[in-house]
Amino acid sequence: MVKIKGVNLSSGLKSNEARFGKESLKRLLDSLSDEDKKVFASTILDSAWYPLDVFVHYIEKSFEQNYKGNVEEYKKTVHDATELQLKGVYRSFLALGTVEKIVHELGRITHQYFQGITVKTEELAEGKVRVIYEGFEKQHAFYEISVQAWWEKVLGMLGIAKDIKVQIITSIGAGKGILELLLTWNKK
């Protein structure tokens, strides 16, 4: 079973509440299955592990209820959550040098956010890196929008990249157990 670190859930909840309010968040959590509600009923610990399936159910419901299917609006909340996640110790990764090196290092520490997922990065050319996540299951397909938005925000936070694009090359929904992204940018 693929698991995700609680910081993803807590930052997602905080960003959602900030954008839509407490009542909206309550309605969203009430709309989840009884099994998923159990996870959110207790305090979410940033350092604890939770089933990725539960988080995917939460973001699918949020996308449907709060965003009415608007991907770009949903990505704004992911961007806000990413900023919350990268405060503190993880922010230091954004000062490692070249964009390529930062992408590689962030891929390398993915085990701190996921259990059951591995990440490989491959520099294809200057300003062009392939990132491959292995271990996702087909039911996690919606989560790829979050991963895509996460990389968009991270690259934007560096302050040394412009014209940032994060393309999905192989979708989780294809059922191959991977998510393949192509990250491209130009130096500022």
Image (cartoon, rainbow, N blue to C red):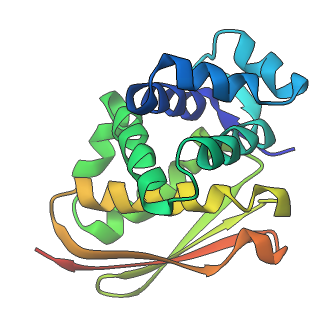
Residue under the image location 68 percent in, 58 percent down:
142
Does residue 96 show up? no
Quadrant location of the C terminus? bottom left
The answer to which image quadrant residue 29 occupies is top right
As drawn, is 81 to the left or to the right of 99? right
User: Front-most of 47 and 105?
Assistant: 47
- Residue 107 image point, x, y percent: 51, 58
Residue under the image location 31 percent in, 28 percent down:
88
- Residue 155 image point, x, y percent: 31, 61
Outermost residue toward the left? Answer: 188
The answer to which image quadrant residue 117 occupies is bottom right
Residue under the image location 34 percent in, 55 percent down:
153
User: Front-most of 168 and 15?
Assistant: 15
Question: Above or below — where is 8 with respect to 161?
Answer: above
Question: Above or below — where is 105 with respect to 3?
Answer: below
User: Front-most of 99 and 63?
Assistant: 63
The answer to which image quadrant residue 173 occupies is bottom right
Quadrant location of the N terminus? top right
Residue under the image location 33 percent in, 40 percent down:
83
- Residue 178 image point, x, y percent: 73, 70
For the image, the number of numbered tags is 0
As drawn, is 31 to the left or to the right of 100? right
Does residue 174 show up? yes
